[in-house]
Image (cartoon, helix red, strand yellow):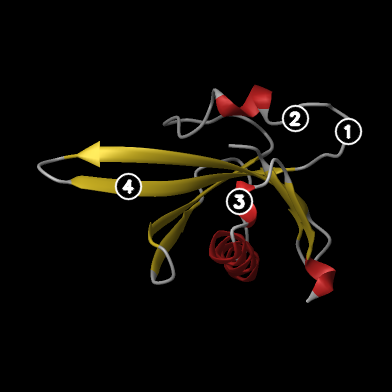
Amino acid sequence: MSPIFFTLHDDKHLMIIPDTQAHLNGHAIITFTYSIYIDKQDGSPYPAQRKENTLHLDNNSDPDYYGFITFEKPGSLFTYTSDGQLELTAEESNEVIEHLSHIRDDGGWKSDRYDTDSTEN
């Protein structure tokens, strides 16, 4: 999937890389995870490509990594895991969850690239 770019209310620019995992332990469970990185807006044509190979490593040493959000049951059960060098505040993680929920609910994830600006709310 293509990365999702948006700006939080505190003017923090983020790049979110969607990832889907299927687990089979007697039954199928699909887990949707979204890795969170700072978007440096450095003009790189494909900023996500260099990040995708480090998704969900036990020790992600990328200095731009904030951790990941997991949607176990969309709309009702999700978690933010801060396992990077950076950490979102509770308010910021809630804002990311709200943005991702909006994108998921409205089908915006189907586009090639989803850009949004938090100031439009």
- Is 44 placed above or below 111 here? above
Classify mark 3: helix, strand or loop: helix
Q: Amino acid at mark 3?
A: Trp
Place of residue 3 in the rendered image (x, y in percent of width and height, measured from the top left): 66, 40
Query: Which of the labelled discs sits on residue 109, or is there none?
Result: 3
- Tell me residue 11's x, y (percent): 84, 61
Determine whether, in the image, residue 83 is placed left or right of residue 24: right
Residue 47 got which mark? 2
* Kind of residue sitting beneath label 1: Asp
Horizontal side of residue 58 vs 67, given as left or right:
left
Residue occupied by mark 1: 42
Query: Looking at the image, which is closer to me, 24 or 86?
Result: 24
Q: Label 4, secondary structure: give it.
A: strand
Residue drawn 66% across and 22% down? 50
Alpha carbon distance from label 1 to label 2: 9 Å
Q: Earlier in the sequence, mark 4 or mark 1?
A: 4
Residue 30, numbered circle: 4
Distance from label 4 to label 2 (Cα)? 26 Å
Discs 1, 2 touching: Cβ within 8 Å: yes
Q: Which quarter shows the C terminus?
A: bottom right
Q: Earlier in the sequence, mark 4 or mark 2?
A: 4
| Cα–Cα span, label 3 and label 1 | 24 Å
